[in-house]
Image: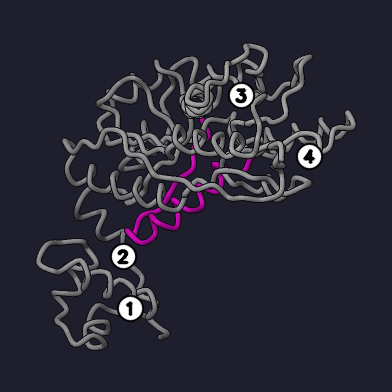
């Protein structure tokens, strides 16, 4: 439908009152969730534009949400969190909100400088995407708007965090390698870098423990420096038959380095990753990995922040979203026949 679509137009299309349309589009009580969803779908199909300016003037809200990503996660090749941002923005649109991206610099993190979009009161809440240091998190807890943390957590239970099930996902993919005959399995990742990498390491380690496989210190291989920048991978003298990488980009770099050394994947060595990012399909061969359900994580994150905007006392704690193994061609079965 062209032109300015009104609530009355939507009401006539659905055969309900304009009051019902208003309640649904403003997420008010008195309308079932099923009807709300139907009204929102029809409103979008008809091209209805929500007047957030008038609503913000009335309610004192900006109808903007800040999405904060540390600059270490926004390199030229690292697009995983930018995919998250795109999905978050799409989900926010269904709530008539806009997402404002803020890149947190190393300097601002170190000096505990809060995002300008917060200090200038341009947003109603903040979603922090990716790991930030504990002192900065403690400062965020003092702010007067709601915040949730996506893809990381700390030891502070009162923080609301939405995470993929890093532990179980890596536990399962390590079990898969062991079922394929691998016993000399290395983990590639700095276990002190992020809570996600720590949990992925612990999932890997639990799998080794359950199968009575000793963990060798030289099989825990660092992939980055203290600032989060990738470094050259140092291979152990006793080469593993398989590598478990903390993410797909690391697996991509690892496979390229192995190939330079004349080591073929999976003929000579198997490799698995985590995330199911673009790097999983860029590797040769395509990478077996754990898929992170970033769409569901985005939906849950936005739902939580919206509830917290309505009720600042709302608490969720840690929420885990399950991932799944994507089987490709980077693993060889070496079990003795």
Q: Earlier in the sequence, mark 3 or mark 1?
A: 1
Q: Is residue 31 left or right of residue 37?
A: left
* Residues in magenta, as a range: 78-104
**Residue at mark 4:** 265
The earlier-in-sequence mark between 2 and 3 is 2
What is the CA distance from the residue labelled 4 to the residue labelled 1? 50 Å
The CA span between labels 4 and 3 is 19 Å
- Marker disc for residue 51: 2
Query: Is residue 188 visible in the rendered structure shown here?
Result: no
Whether residue 321 appears in magenta in the rendering, the answer is no
- Residue at image position (58%, 50%) is 326
Which label number is shown at residue 189? 3
Q: Position of residue 195 (x, y in %)?
A: 46, 25
Upstream in sequence: badge 2 or badge 4 = 2
Mark 1 Cα-neighbour bin, 10 Å: few <14, some 14–19, many ≥20: some
Spatial CA span between label 2 and label 1: 17 Å
Sequence-wise, which precedes: disc 2 or disc 1? Answer: 1
**Which residue matches tag 1?**
42
Classify mark 3: residues with Cα within 10 Å, few (<14), some (14-19) or many (20+): many
């Amino acid at each position: 439908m062209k032109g300015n679509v009104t609530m009355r137009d939507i009401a006539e299309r659905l055969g309900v009152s304009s009051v019902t349309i208003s309640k649904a589009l403003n997420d008010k009580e008195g309308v079932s969730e099923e009807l709300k969803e139907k009204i929102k779908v029809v409103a979008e199909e008809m091209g209805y534009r929500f007047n957030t300016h008038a609503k913000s003037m009335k309610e004192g809200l900006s109808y903007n949400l800040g999405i904060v990503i540390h600059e270490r996660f926004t390199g030229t090749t690292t697009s995983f969190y930018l995919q998250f941002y795109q999905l978050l923005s799409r989900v926010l649109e269904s709530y008539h909100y806009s997402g404002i991206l803020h890149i947190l610099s190393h300097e601002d993190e170190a000096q505990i400088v809060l995002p300008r979009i917060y200090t200038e009161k341009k947003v109603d809440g903040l979603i922090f995407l990716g790991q930030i240091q504990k002192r900065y998190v403690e400062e965020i807890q003092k702010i007067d708007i709601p915040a949730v943390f996506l893809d990381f957590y700390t030891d502070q239970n009162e923080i609301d965090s939405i995470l993929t099930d890093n532990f179980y996902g890596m536990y399962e993919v390590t079990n898969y390698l062991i079922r394929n005959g691998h016993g000399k399995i290395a983990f590639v990742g700095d276990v002190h870098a992020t809570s996600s990498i720590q949990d992925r390491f612990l999932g890997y380690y639990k799998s080794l423990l359950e199968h009575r496989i000793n963990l060798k210190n030289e099989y825990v291989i660092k992939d980055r420096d203290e600032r989060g920048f990738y470094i050259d991978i140092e291979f152990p003298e006793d080469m593993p038959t398989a590598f478990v990488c903390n993410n797909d980009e690391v697996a991509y770099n690892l496979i390229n380095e192995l190939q330079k050394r004349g080591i073929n994947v999976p003929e000579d060595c198997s490799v698995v990753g985590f995330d199911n990012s673009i790097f999983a399909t860029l590797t040769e061969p395509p990478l077996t990995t754990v898929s992170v359900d970033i769409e569901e994580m985005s939906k849950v994150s936005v739902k939580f922040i919206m509830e917290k905007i309505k009720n600042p006392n709302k608490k969720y704690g840690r929420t885990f979203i399950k991932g799944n193994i994507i089987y490709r061609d980077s693993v060889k079965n070496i079990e003795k026949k």
